[in-house]
Amino acid sequence: MSLDRRTFLKGLGTAVALPALDAMVPARAIAALAPTTAAAPPTRMAFLFTPNGVNMNAWRPTAEGAMSALPETLAPLAKVKNHVNVLTGLTQHHAFANGDGAGDHARSTACYLTGVQPYKTAGSNIKNGISADQLAALKVGNRTKFASLEIGCERGGQNGDCDSGYSCAYSSNISWRSENQPVAKEVNPRLVYERLFGNGAKGEEAEAKSRRDLFRRSVLDFVSEDAASLKAKLGVTDRRKLDEYFTGVREIERRLAKFENGQAALVAAGAARPTGVPADYAEHLRLMGDMMILAFQADLTRISTFMFANDGSNRSYHQIGVAEGHHDVSHHGNDAEKLAKKKLIDKFHVEQLAYILGRMSEIKEADGRSLLDHTMLVYGAGISDGDRHNHDDLPILLCGGGAGLKGGRHVIYKHHTPLNNLYVSMLDRMGIPGEKLGDSNGSLAGLF
């Protein structure tokens, strides 16, 4: 059979997109699938943000070129090393003060994907620029159910003073639809899940959610008739792919239910109602990462941003033995103990990245390659050394294999090369050539 790529399984208040199946590939293209073929798996792009810089001594490889070994902080990426590039020398010029005084954390966040100097204000007259993800969403977002997906693990306000006279809107958002319109991230994994699998009919969605909660049912139970009818028409390989996809959906549901049952027990015992966000930070990061992966796998979107935390975050990391706040530790003053703790935090974040990349590498698409092979993923920070608050020589990783991306290398660019040149290069590979973004002055050579 031939199956449309945009097919959904539907039920009451529910619409479940399908992963890439062989039945979605025209027979004439199966034998020689090429990136130029209409049926080829799409290229995705994701931008992951981590706060407060890193301990650069444990981050940067010792030599340029192919990486035979990874630095200590990046060691968790060993299994996906050939899909990882460490980029050195990139700068966000407009995250520096440039006459605006203090506020590096707010500027580094707002500027991360825009390359524009945010207007210093704590009022409603915010002004920044369009971000790389939203420029991509504007150009190609109409090809999927959602133009883009914005997620994170730390809430943030959209008004008020959060950093030395800068609005909280700057500190809380890396995604900007226009110069005065940030795109707020969702931090509650349940709400992300409901958004991905709702059919858009508000009344039906509410009823379906009520039934699922009452009878502890899966979204898949609401589309079981559609699923059974479809599977009867599919080949063996596609049935296996569908079963693997459904297993992933149910696993996310199981983890959400486990977390929510714990919340209910706390409320029953007289505790204040929790906020809907897992207390276990690693589980929260991985759940949100799995949501992004699911959205990519089902082609619900091809563009995503994921903020591990807001810059300036002072979260403590008791689970890895760091009781002090992250921001406090980042102001290390070259103290050996603080530098060691910063390295532990950096490595913890990279471990979560390794989980996300590992999961993506396990998901096979119609051409036999993995989801990771069809993704360009940037991971990094808007500050290099948290003590210096510098925005040059930023810690940036470019991961995946999308659009012919080469991996496993440490690539050094001329100092003060605009970070936005990387985004321009990625946009070109998304079929959006010739764009100028923020302070970009060209593209980066040698990546693809």
Image: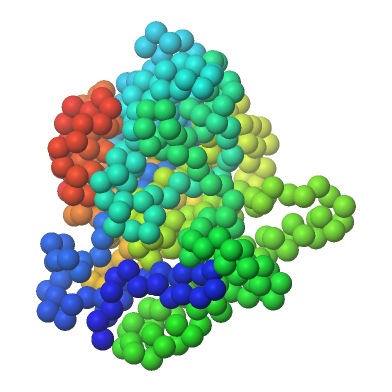
On-image quarter of the N terminus: bottom left
Q: How many marks?
A: 0
The residue that appears at 23% across and 33% down in the rendered structure is 421
Of 315 and 292, nearer the camera is 292
The residue furthest top is 99
Of 136 and 404, nearer the camera is 136
In the image, residue 62 sits, relative to residue 370, either above or below, namely above
Of 299 and 67, nearer the camera is 299
In this view of the protein, can residue 102 be seen by the observer?
Answer: yes
- Residue 195 relative to residue 357: left or right: right
In the image, residue 158 sits, relative to residue 292, either above or below, namely above
Q: Position of residue 20 (x, y in %)?
A: 32, 71
Q: Position of residue 346 (x, y in %)?
A: 50, 40
For residue 257, which quarter of the picture?
Answer: bottom right
In this view of the protein, can residue 296 be seen by the observer?
Answer: no
The residue that appears at 87% across and 56% down in the rendered structure is 269
